[in-house]
Structure formats: structure tokens, C-alpha cells
């Protein structure tokens, strides 16, 4: 039998339906692959017994002709989604051994449709980061390495464990969350597909909050079709999340393979940033050529407030984070470090429980929200946010269907390379992705090429609100033109 871990999610789905193999066999193949890949540090919790039990139940439902749309398909879940009875940490010491007694809506939707939980994946602490280096469990290694080098590379962040697990064929798909790029950037760094849907498409209920007005869940997969299949299951209105959108969920998979003839694709001139590697620039041009060849019409567009997006994001996101993280006080969840009195206990707990980057965000957030600074920073950033949103609205009003940009300003970098004294080095990674969260729009990253060092590079497509279908149609054209590249060599198994 062919290696069951190298199937796409769609192939596995179809093979299970045709009874070519069982859900138990697929689960076992992935459990074994995860064991062999512990060196990647992609998982912070493996749940093999649960996976086997869920797979056995899937096999029974398949036998009875009651299979759901994801029946028997093993997935990995970012450890930011609460999972009933399975430890959930947000990769933070402060959550300790917190075991939720409830299930996030998004993961609940996946299990409803028959998917199988393989385990929880590593991430930057509270999803704050772009490299997975802020995790209390240590960094994740990117399955990809530079040609002729053994230097460990980051998988991107914050959903680095999920991206690495999908790229290394440890699961058929995974969940991520994206507040400023945490799905799209790691997808680009690992040669996987990642989509952040429109704000409100997926429920935030049961997802550990970072910045509530920006956070969105979305899938990682190895193909555009697989991402479409997963997103359909994850999406849907949830009365438990007041920002969840009451919008019909289309069959996203049907958009894959649809013609893009006559669709208008915008190329924003503001995304041509200083010091962009020539290879990234060339790939962007190549992507535009591919879309043109498929019948799309390319238009030069302007998003004039792009340059303010990063500074505004790094005010809004920490502000919301400082408020959301106030609940970790040693009383309600996880870690408690006793102190002389209750204030001392709070202080001891929070200083021991939070890592340096989270502390930085709490400090920045508290500062920009404090009396006297609120107007100068937070209010100003909110105004900028409105202008960024308006830039997109104006472009879409002119008939642009989607916008093509690079996904990241570079390929994956080395562990330690940007985690130095200046945090802005790291923040600059989000330059192409944060605008999309600020405007609440859907964005997809699709692998589009390999650079001279042998590392994957991705292109990003940004769409109109609730028009993920166009992103899947256009993304599939890029995928087809680029050709699916072979998976990384399994050096971690040696
Ligand atoms: N890298 C960004 C940050 O650190 C985005 C993280 C995310 O999307 N969760 O805030």
C-alpha cells in the first residue's frame, strides 16, 4: 500500500469512501510518523489513543454508510483551541495543565464531521510571534532546510507547529489562527496552503483570545482543495460568538478548478517594499503572469495607507491582548505562585507564567490604553484601521475581485536569526499580512515557488468579505501553474 501519510486529504477521503483502506490504518500511519518526527517539536501533546478510538468509530460509521464529510481524516489542532478533556496550553506556562471541559466550536465542527484528533500543535506563546520561538515548549523546526545546510529554520509563527506538521506529512490538515498573519506566514514558510477567512466566518468560541477584533481561525493543508474542504467544516454561524457571521457557508471545494477568465486581479504598488529579495519580487511577477495566462485581467491598484498598517497593528493587537490576558491571575486558570497577599500572588503568578514577548505586549497594550495616551495611540490606531479598510473597499468598489501580493518578505529564516534584542525585526515579517486582519478580509497563502536556497515561497491573495470562493479559484490556478513541489526530505527520520 502507498504511504498513507503522503495522500492529500481529498485522496484520503475518497479512498476511505471506496474502502481502499480504513480510518484506523490512516490514523496508525500518522501516529507512527509523529513519533518519528519528535525532533521537529511540532506537537506539544500527542493523543494516539484518542485518535485510534475516533478512527475506530469512523470505520463503524463508514461501514454503516453514515460517514461525515471528514470521516476518518486525521488532523492536528493548534494548542490555542480548547479541546474537551485534552490539555490546552496556548504554549504558555501560565495555563499550566489546564484541561478544558468544553470544546471550541471550530474543533467541535470538525469532530461532528468525523475528523480524528492526532494531537495539539506548538505555537508562539498566546499566538504572539512570527517564528514559533516564543513558545514555552521551545521552537519548532521547519521541515525544510537550506540546500547543503543543517541549520534549523523556523516554520514561521504563530501557528508553526500546525504548518510544520502538515508540511512533514504528520497529519492530513491542521487548524491555525491568524491575528496578523499567523496562518499565512507559516504556510508560506513551509510550502503549505493556509487561509484566514473573513472575520466572523469561523467562531472564536473556545479559542484562547489574543486580540479579539483580529483573531480568526482557519485551516492548513497541502493543497488548495484540501484547505477548501476543511474550511467548509470549520465555518458557520455560532450564537456563542457575538461576532460570528450569520452567513451561508458555500461548498468551497466547488470553487476549486473554476475558470478565472475575466476576473480582475489587483496588484498593489505599496507592497513593493524596500529590501525585498529579488526572488520574491520575481515570484510576484510570475504569479501575475500565471493569472493573466488563465484569462484574468491584471490591474495596478493603490492601497495608500499600507505603510501605517504595521505600526497601527502593533498598537491595536497589544491593547486587546493586555485586556484579554488580564484573566490569567492565578485564580481562575493554571499556574499559581503564592505570595504574601493577593496582589503579590497576582504579580508572582504573572511574572513566572508569562514569557518575555507576552510581557512586552501587555506592557505596550496597557500603556496605549492608559489615560493621557489613549487618544494619541489607541484612538489614532483605530482611525488608521478605518482608513486601511476604506482603501480596500475603494479598490473592490472599482471591480477588483482579488488582490495578489507576496505572502512574506522572505523565505524561512534561521532559528535565532530574528529573535534578538530588537523585536521590530520580527514584527516586520507581518508587513504583507496584517492589513488583511485590520480590514477583516479573507486572505490565502499558496505555495508558488522554491528559491535559490531550496526553500518554499508563497503568494497571498486577498479577497472581498465572505468571498473565500474567489480565493480558492484563483489560488488553485497558482497551485496548478507552480506545480506541486515534492515534500521536504525526511532528515528528521534519520
Ligand atoms: N506575528 C503577529 C504578532 O506577533 C501575528 C500573530 C498572529 O497572527 N497570531 O502579533
Image (tube, grey):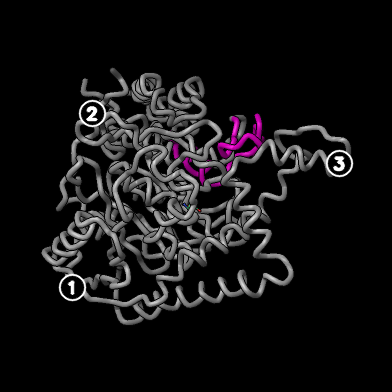
- In the image: residue 100, left or right of residue 215: right
Q: Residue at x 57, y 63 (%)?
A: 315
Outermost residue, front side: 421
Q: Which residue is mark 3?
A: 342
Q: Residues within 10 Å of mark 2 (few under 14, many from 20)?
A: few
Q: Which residue is mark 1?
A: 297
Residue 207 got which mark? none
Q: Which residues are magenta?
A: 87-115
Q: Position of residue 165 (x, y in %)?
A: 38, 33
Q: Residue at x 29, y 75 (%)?
A: 400
> Is residue 255 at least partly visible in the picture?
no
The numbered mark, 3 or 1, whose residue comes first in the sequence reads 1
Q: Position of residue 191 (x, y in %)?
A: 28, 43
Q: Is residue 6 above or below residue 381?
A: above
Q: Position of residue 438 (x, y in %)?
A: 48, 66
- In the image: residue 330, left or right of residue 358: right
Alpha carbon separation for disc pair 2 and 3: 53 Å
Q: Which residue is mark 2?
A: 489
Amino acid at each position: 500500500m502507498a504511504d498513507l501519510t503522503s495522500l492529500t486529504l481529498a485522496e484520503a477521503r475518497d479512498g476511505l469512501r471506496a474502502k481502499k483502506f480504513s480510518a484506523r490504518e490512516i490514523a496508525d500511519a500518522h501516529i507512527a510518523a509523529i513519533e518519528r518526527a519528535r525532533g521537529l517539536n511540532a506537537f506539544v501533546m500527542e493523543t494516539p489513543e484518542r485518535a485510534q478510538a475516533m478512527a475506530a468509530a469512523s470505520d463503524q460509521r463508514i461501514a454503516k454508510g453514515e460517514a461525515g464529510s471528514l470521516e476518518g481524516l486525521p488532523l492536528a489542532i493548534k494548542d490555542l483551541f480548547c479541546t474537551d478533556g485534552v490539555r490546552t496550553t496556548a504554549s504558555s506556562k501560565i495555563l499550566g495543565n489546564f484541561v478544558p471541559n468544553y470544546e471550541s466550536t471550530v474543533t467541535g465542527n470538525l469532530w461532528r464531521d468525523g475528523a480524528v484528533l492526532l494531537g495539539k500543535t506548538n505555537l508562539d506563546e498566546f499566538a504572539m510571534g512570527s517564528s514559533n520561538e516564543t513558545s514555552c515548549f521551545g521552537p519548532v523546526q521547519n521541515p525544510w532546510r537550506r540546500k547543503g545546510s543543517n541549520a534549523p529554520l523556523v516554520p514561521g509563527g504563530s501557528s508553526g507547529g500546525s504548518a510544520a506538521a502538515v508540511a512533514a506529512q504528520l497529519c492530513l490538515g491542521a487548524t491555525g489562527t491568524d491575528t496578523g498573519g499567523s496562518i499565512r506566514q507559516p504556510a508560506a514558510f513551509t510550502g503549505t496552503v493556509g487561509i484566514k477567512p473573513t472575520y466572523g466566518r469561523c467562531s472564536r468560541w473556545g479559542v484562547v483570545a489574543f486580540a479579539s477584533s483580529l483573531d480568526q481561525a482557519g485551516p492548513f493543508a497541502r493543497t488548495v482543495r484540501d484547505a477548501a474542504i476543511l474550511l467548509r467544516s470549520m465555518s458557520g454561524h455560532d450564537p456563542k460568538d457575538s461576532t460570528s457571521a450569520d452567513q451561508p457557508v458555500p461548498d468551497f471545494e466547488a470553487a476549486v478548478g473554476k475558470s478565472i477568465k475575466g476576473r480582475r486581479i489587483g496588484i498593489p504598488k505599496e507592497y513593493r517594499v524596500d529590501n525585498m529579495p529579488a526572488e520574491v519580487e520575481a515570484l510576484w511577477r510570475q504569479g501575475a503572469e500565471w493569472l493573466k495566462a488563465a484569462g484574468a485581467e491584471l490591474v495596478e491598484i493603490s492601497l495608500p495607507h499600507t505603510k501605517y498598517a504595521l505600526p497601527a497593528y502593533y498598537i491595536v493587537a497589544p491593547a486587546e491582548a493586555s485586556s484579554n490576558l488580564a484573566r490569567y491571575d492565578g485564580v481562575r486558570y493554571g499556574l499559581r505562585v503564592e505570595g504574601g497577599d493577593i496582589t503579590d500572588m497576582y504579580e508572582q503568578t504573572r511574572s513566572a507564567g508569562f514569557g518575555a514577548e507576552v510581557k512586552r505586549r501587555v506592557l505596550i497594550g496597557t500603556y496605549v490604553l492608559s489615560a493621557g495616551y489613549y487618544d494619541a495611540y489607541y484612538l489614532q490606531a483605530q482611525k488608521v484601521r478605518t482608513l486601511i479598510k476604506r482603501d480596500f473597499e475603494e479598490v473592490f468598489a472599482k471591480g477588483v475581485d482579488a488582490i495578489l501580493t507576496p505572502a512574506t518578505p522572505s523565505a524561512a529564516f534561521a532559528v535565532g536569526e530574528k529573535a534578538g534584542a530588537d523585536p521590530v525585526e520580527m514584527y516586520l515579517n507581518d508587513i504583507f499580512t496584517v492589513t488583511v486582519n485590520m480590514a477583516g478580509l479573507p486572505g490565502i497563502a499558496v505555495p508558488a515557488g522554491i528559491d535559490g536556497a531550496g526553500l518554499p515561497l508563497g503568494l497571498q491573495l486577498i479577497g472581498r468579505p465572505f468571498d473565500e470562493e474567489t480565493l480558492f479559484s484563483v489560488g488553485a490556478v497558482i497551485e496548478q501553474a507552480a506545480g506541486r513541489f515534492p515534500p521536504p526530505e525526511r532528515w528528521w527520520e534519520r
